[in-house]
Image (tube, grey):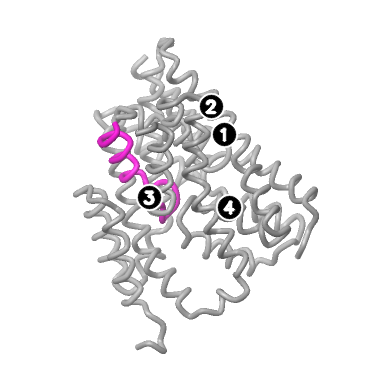
Amino acid sequence: MNEYLQLILVFGRLSLLSFGGGIGILPEMERLVVEEHHWLTHRQFVDSFALGQLTPGPGMLMVMATGYRVAGVPGALVAAAAIFAPAGFLSWFVAERWTRLRRSTWIGSLREALGAVALGLLAAGVLTLGKSGVDDIYTFGLTGLASWLLMGQRLNPAFVVLLCGLMGWIIYG
Amino acid sequence: MRVALGSLARVFGLVGLTSFGGGRSAYFHDSLVFRRKWFSDEEFLETLAVTQILPGPTFFNMSVFFGQRLSGPLGALLAAVLILGPGACLMLVLSHFYFSGLDLPGTTAVFKGIGAAAVALSLATTLRVARRAAQARGGAALALATFLGVGVLQLNALLVLPVLTAIGLWLNRPRWVR
């Protein structure tokens, strides 16, 4: 099958499943990108997530790395369009009708249900990243340190990512 | 509140360039509510809640939502492009270097460190929403089932999510249906 079409099918479907934002969809994305299509290795997948954290805008821009790997610059653009367009269209659709929709009593129910499902997806996302991100005592300690800096000290995530990169360079370089 | 496309472009263009890191919705609160008073606090929180429900990154959904409310369909499109543009350009450059194969010394070491940061980031996001999400009726059980199905058993999310969402909807149905 045409590689652009495959990118559209994979990321377009992920777009509509990404409840809980970017991190919640990581397990399913990994399943498709690494295990089913072999576009990236497990390590490259985690690295592409990190790249997404270094750039401004949504971290979901990480899919451009996969697209680039598959089909160069056009592939990267197709992957980005596929993951953002469906969700974006849905948001636009709801915003356009919002004055009417907000009166529905099911909105609250939907929020409760999807909030719980999104929490499970987020926890699954932690598992996906942890499986290859934490593989020895150093990365375990570094994860603890980074968690403390993010949650305890409320440092900017992009800064914490850069700091951990530096620490990695010192430890393993 | 309706604003001209030009003013919308200036605001969203700046957010697209500067929104590094998590908690990105704070950038919108600062620029749209605090500085310009285009939306009230209540409208902002309502938009945050509804864009969290919708699939897709909340921050991206919010830009489309606010864009539509401020300047109609063209505003929504312009907001999306401006929020994604700068990050997409940088991502192209980073991807190129990452896959260029010119194996710079220390790259693997740096990425091992960054990988640990990625785990911490996802953990922080999860814990931030945990208490609120577990308060739903059957919330903890639904979250656990989702975690087991998608994370541990790696079942197809396309099958797992609709079923669990339907159960959650029914458990939390509006009073008049009960």
Q: Which region is colored magenta? A: A18-37
Q: Count neighbours of disc 4 (C-alpha within 10 A) and say few if under 14, some if 14 to 19, many if 20 or more.
A: some
Mark seen at residue A24: 3
How many angstroms separate mark 1 from mark 4 (CA)?
19 Å
* B132 vs B85, nearest the viewer: B85
* B19 vs A61, nearest the viewer: A61
Is B48 on the left-hand or right-hand side of A170?
right
Q: Per the image, is A57 magenta?
A: no
Rendered location of residue B46, percent (x, y): 58, 67
Residue positioned 47% across, 52% down in the render: B56
Identify residue for label 1: B88
Identify residue for label 4: B25
Residue positioned 31% across, 40% down in the render: A32
Mark seen at residue B131: none
Marks 1,4: beta carbons within 8 A: no
How many angstroms separate mark 4 from mark 2 (CA)?
24 Å
Residues tagged by mark 3 and mark 4 found on one chain of the structure: no
Label 1 vs 4, first from the N-terminus: 4
Disc 2 secondary structure class: helix
Residues tagged by mark 1 and mark 4 found on one chain of the structure: yes
Identify residue for label 2: B92
Q: Amino acid at mark 1?
A: Ala
How many angstroms separate mark 3 from mark 2 (CA)?
24 Å
How many angstroms separate mark 3 from mark 1 (CA)?
21 Å
Q: Per the image, is A35 magenta?
A: yes
Q: Is residue B12 above or below residue B171?
A: above
Chain to which mark 1 belongs = B
**Residue B22 appears in the figure:** yes
Q: Quadrant of the N terminus of chain A?
A: top left
Marks 2,1: beta carbons within 8 A: yes
Answer with the quarter of the image where residue B20 lies: top right
Is B143 on the left-hand or right-hand side of A104?
left
